[in-house]
Amino acid sequence: MSLLPETPAILEVRHAVRAWLARHEPAGTVVVALSGGADSLALTAAAVAEAPSVRALVVDHQLQEGSDRVAATAAARALDLGCARADVVPVDVTASGGLEAAARSARYAALDAGRGGHPVLLGHTLDDQAETVLLGLARGSGGRSIRGMAEYDAPWGRPLLWVRRATTRRACADLALEPYEDPHNSDPGFTRVRLRTEVLPLLEDALGGGVSAALARTAGQLREDGEVLDTLARQALASARDGDDLLVERLHEIPVAVRRRVLRAWLLDAGAKALTDKQLRAVDDLISHWRGQGGVAVGGGGPGVRLVASRSRGRLSADFVND
């Protein structure tokens, strides 16, 4: 493709991609997850301009009539923009947990299978980050749920987390690219769409603007703090381990913010799934408020089987037991 126009929007997207590449130094090819929407189209154009080699992966969720044509059009645009290769990957969205979650799981699995060992760039913007933080606040499950998406969580890279959605749209207009408008993105039946079209605009109006950027900054600060606490927790977990068990005496004096991270990592390693804050606090009580209470059942196992954390003789153990 010819050199990109040097408009403010295109330059902002390019600079974001350039900075991400400089920070994370991927070797050789990067893969762009291309939907055909404005965010991923702008990202693809910038990646081609900034990275040595770019492949595009287009996931066809097959949820709407004509989705194959939409995917084929996106792949053709990727080649026009200068991608070395563009592949369409059809998926079946059949998992449980709601359409949004099922589509996301199918998409990430397809991208992971097709990336060929290369990092995958995703078109998440500052606006997506703000929506993610609000969703995390609604869950009420602590700092981990409101620190948003990481700039790089291998193999997933997000160069546009400080770029507004309006900027990617302007960049596409400057490039004479008409983005695909997914009807799901305007369907109020999806929680994220209502956040985008109702809640965030109301907050921006009521608080005088700047809310999305403030939420994104908060996510970044919480992520930095969380990384420090996670490092301390890994060190404490290594010190407290005795085989598969934990030695209670080595956890007593640890600050609670670190100790609960230790317990979370230990339980996940033991096979826990979908840990709740209530469960984690109950397991923590086996250390901080020990009164001889019984074990704590947490998510994990299969039908008729539970993972139970219990304390005996100064040790915490996690075992699968039959109901």
Image (spheres, rainbow, N blue to C red):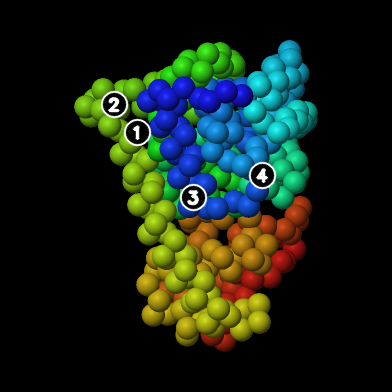
User: Which quarter of the image is occupied by the N terminus?
Assistant: top right
Q: Which residue is mark 3?
A: 22
- Residue 260 visible in the shown view: no
Q: Hey, which quadrant is residue 296 in on the image?
A: bottom right
**Three-letter residue code for mark 2:** Glu
Q: What amino acid is at disc 1?
A: Ser
Q: Quadrant of residue 68?
A: top right
Mark 1 and mark 4: span between their CA atoms? 32 Å
In space, the residues marked 3 and 1 are separated at their CA atoms by 26 Å
Q: Tell me the distance, in whole angstroms, between the alpha carbons under discs 3 and 2.
A: 33 Å
Left/right placement of residue 244 relative to residue 39 reads right
What residue does disc 1 label?
A: 212
**Mark 4 — residue?**
29
Mark 3: secondary structure: helix
- Up-down relation of residue 212 to residue 312 (above or below): above
Residue drawn 48% across the image and 52% down it? 23
Q: Residues within 10 Å of mark 4 (few under 14, many from 20)?
A: some
Q: Which residue is mark 2?
A: 204
- Check disc 4 and give the amino acid type: Thr
Kindly check if marks 1 and 2 are in contact, taking CB atoms under 8 A apart as contact.
Answer: yes
